[in-house]
Image (cartoon, rainbow, N blue to C red):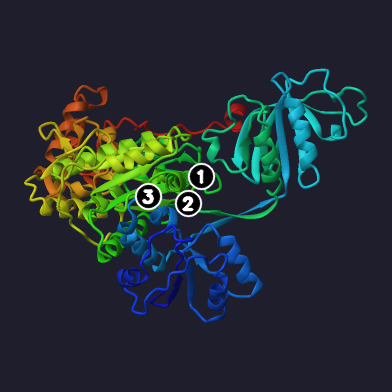
Amino acid sequence: MKIGNTDIMVCDCGGSMDIDGKALAKACGSENGCSVASSLCRDQIDRVETALNEPSSRRIIACTQEAATFTQLAEDMDADIPDFINIRELAGWSDDGKATLPKIAALIRSATDAQPAARSLTLTSAGRCLIYADGARGNGVDAAMKLATELQDTLGVTVMITNAGDDILASGVSGLVTRGKISRASGHFTAFDLVIDGFAAALPSSRGTLSFEPTQDGIETGCDVIIDLTGAPALFTGWEKRDGYFRVSAEDSVRLASLAGEAGDMIGEFEKPIYVDYDAALCAHSRNSLNGCSRCLDVCPAGAIISSGDTVEIDPAICGGCGYCGAVCPSGAAQTALPPADTFMQQMSQLLDHYIEAGGKAPRLLLTDEGYGIEMIEMIARFGPGLPATMLPMTMHSVGRVGHDILVTAIAQGFEQVAILTNPAKADEAPQIARQIEFARALLQGVKADDDNRFLLIDAADPEMVASQLRDSLPNKSFKAAPFSPLGSPRGITRLAMRGLAASQKADITAVPLPDGAPYGRVDIDTDNCTICLSCVGACPAGALQDNPDAPQLLFREDACLQCGICAATCPEKVISLIPQFNLADSAMNAELVIEDTPFHCTGCGKPFGSSRSIEKVIEKLSGHSMFTGSKQTDMLKMCEDCRVEVMFSEDDRMLDVGERRKPRTTDDYMN
């Protein structure tokens, strides 16, 4: 089958999928029809050989299980290696039979859409491997020695034993053994930095049991790979996401056996994807040493984000790509780049369009990661009922990036439900997504599109339970979609989705109330006590609070407000509080007048130099100060800076006037 410039080969996998080639070609918009094979990887592999000999700008084989077979064939023929897509577990292997055809067509057409290229970071490993074991805990020493023996031919191995006893037997790897305790660890794969206390190397002359050199504290060293067998608390927060750091039980012989092969390959150059794009100019972390937004710092499980003055720094070498920062960042300063959020939402929209054009009805969306989630789907398809015909799967590097922006946009496009399949082994994943679902439901409730089953968060480990939830937990209420092109920033896309849903549902509401911590809202200013000092304007990182250069006015633009709280922390009068809400009105995009005052004119030259409220407040606060007890000092507060300086230097009772300086005495003065 040919779609555009792409040739697609389809196989029903021995008749295990009910695929009508003619109907599939029509659903995919292919005019040349579709010849469905039954055994491309075996009896009909000659079809693949023939196809590989023919010129094609791009070729896709709808099979992932036998990708290695087809890849090897292409290499043997010196042909271009085709791409592969999964239509079997994701669609065809389902109890719904022929009803899956629109989904199969949508998956095939989506595979022909252009995919963005990902950026990467080059890391070079010299193979310096530290195996860290505890001599007082279980089988740690023996496991470390055995692993060192297996790795010493490929890596530069050092074994370090904490709580080392006097009964460690000498062996052929004794020259690799040290003792010590890691007191501080930082860094990333290829560049781990360690500080070790009680360090001592084993003497190569050790006979019988190991003898060590005198111990030293505060030894600084580094390595490329760390294998931690101690069973103690991990050396890093979010250690599962720290590449190059392996934490394994010394008693787990199966994992240790696989680790020997995995760690042995960690030498040479590696391309690590850059998961996050960061724009410090948009960051609302801090201003003038006053803390504001810390959402990304609070959720990052890998410790890849640190505070750096008024902004933050994200180390791409440490970042594990969990996506949490992109989901919670209110300004868009930190956004996932694999793919960018707007690109992912465009792909989501295109998948839905392909499904509807192929005749699909009542679409639902399943978001899952490329590891655990796909394995779970394959289990359900192979041993259970498979995915429902109406459930369209999309994979992400990590479902941690599922934020309220993606959820609300999916509903606006026309998905009746969004299900998110999380990994139960990642305890921090489900709570983060649940918080975003809370925001999304609050938004949808305001535009009458909410439902108890509109969003489905699944963190079960039992395939039968997962399959049951996907098939049985259906929404109870329908709504009218409001499709749009999701381009721009996450905030802008969310606004388009909400305004579209409000219009399609005919929701008569202006401001949707949101839970505390939401990234949208307005500021409530006590105008009776505000002096229009404009400190908040200078501190606001998003430009939501503005001034008028021609008049003493305070303006506010609600759609720009990030609810970071810097304005409230900055305000000297403490008259600002935050109100989380989502304003659907057009006025939210305009700067509205909050408070204004009459200009205060200089009593000397008549020039306006401030607001009446601010000058009166300054005079009130300084009235009891010892330096402003006289009327002359107070009157100077009513003058502009030029007149104030002129008066200060014309007064006879200047505080700094010390009279004529005494002449210095010289030697002649003393001699005479």
Q: Which residue is mark 2?
A: 275
Residue 284 visible somewhere in the drawing:
no
Q: Is residue 480 above or below residue 106?
A: above
Query: SS for tag 3?
Result: loop
Nearest the viewer among 82 and 545 is 82
Dots 1 and 2: beta carbons under 8 Å?
yes
Dots 1 and 3: beta carbons under 8 Å?
no
Nearest the viewer among 257 and 187 is 257
Q: Quadrant of residue 16?
A: bottom left
Q: Which mark is residue 306?
A: none
Whole-percent x and y of residue 172?
Answer: 88, 34
Query: Earlier along the polypeptide chain: callout 1 or callout 2?
Result: 2
Query: Earlier along the polypeptide chain: callout 2 or callout 3?
Result: 2
Q: Which mark is residue 320?
A: 1
Q: Quadrant of the C terminus?
A: top right
Q: What's the distance in space between the residues labelled 1 and 2, CA to CA?
A: 8 Å
Residue appearing at x 34%, y 48% in the figure: 366
Nearest the viewer among 287 and 338 is 338
Q: Is residue 517 left or right of residue 421?
A: left
Q: Amino acid at mark 3?
A: Ala
Q: Which residue is mark 3?
A: 333
Query: SS for tag 1?
Result: loop
Q: What's the distance in space between the residues labelled 2 and 3, CA to CA?
A: 13 Å
Residue 265 visible somewhere in the drawing:
yes
Whole-percent x and y of residue 17?
Answer: 41, 59
Residue appearing at x 78%, y 32% in the figure: 145
